[in-house]
Image (cartoon, grey):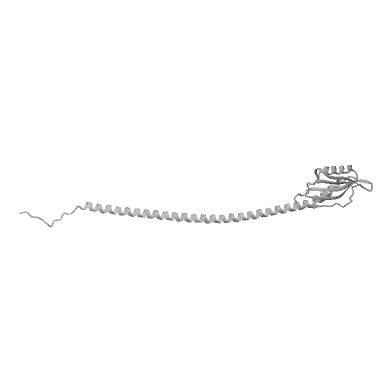
Amino acid sequence: MIRINLLRVETAPAGPSAFQGLAANRLHIAGGLIVVGALAGIGWWYASTQARIAAAGVAIQQAQAERQRLTAVLEQIEQFEAQRTQLQQRVALIEQLRTGQHSPVTLLDQVSRSLPERLWLTGLRQVGATVTIDGRTTTLTSLSDFIGNLENSGAFTRPVEIVTSEVQQSGGVDIVHFQVKANFPLGDPQAQAETAQAAPGKRSRS
């Protein structure tokens, strides 16, 4: 007689199922570690980026402050340059005026020292550095001496030119009417025309 036990159920060995559960746990742990590492990396990158942004913001503020400081310094330098230019112009104007004040005095002094005997002046005009002298003399020798004295004085540029020379009689005496032109370097050629008239009838030193 054959018996068949229909209630018997074969069970699988327990070893392989436990191994599979442990492997699954390790996989979950590894995945969790990867996620945690990724989050930590993202957090570090975010914090680093924020720090760089903050540092860049500070650098920009410092650069703007430095630019404002340099702008103020440049404005001060421009003001100093403008003031220096004004001062230089004032000094030049003062020197020009001082030269203009002494120039006619020096001119008259040099001309007076150059007058020979028997010669007198009737007029003296200065336009810039050009001086025109009108006068009378009784001899051509005195006129020649006057020209030589002007050239040798060192105050006039050589040569001193005789513009006109005409002999006229006055009371039976020959009188030479002359006009002389000379260059007076002490005169300012940029200044306005200056005219200095000598008194008529001024006679030479005897």
- Foreground of the two, 81 or 173: 173
Left-right relation of 75 to 186: left
- Foreground of the two, 7 or 203: 203
Counting the numbered discs, the total is: 0
Residue 153 visible in the shown view: no
Looking at the image, residue 2 lies above or below residue 163: below
Looking at the image, residue 152 lies above or below residue 195: above
Residue 102, x across and y down, in percent: 80, 51
Locate residue 65: give its quadrant: bottom right
Residue 16 visible in the shown view: yes
Left-right relation of 122 to 100: right
Residue 190, x across and y down, in percent: 75, 50
The residue positioned 85% from the left and 43% from the top of the image is 147
Residue 148, x across and y down, in percent: 85, 42
Residue most toward the bottom?
A: 7
Residue most toward the right?
A: 172
Left-right relation of 45 to 10: right
Residue 145, x across and y down, in percent: 87, 42
Residue most toward the left?
A: 1
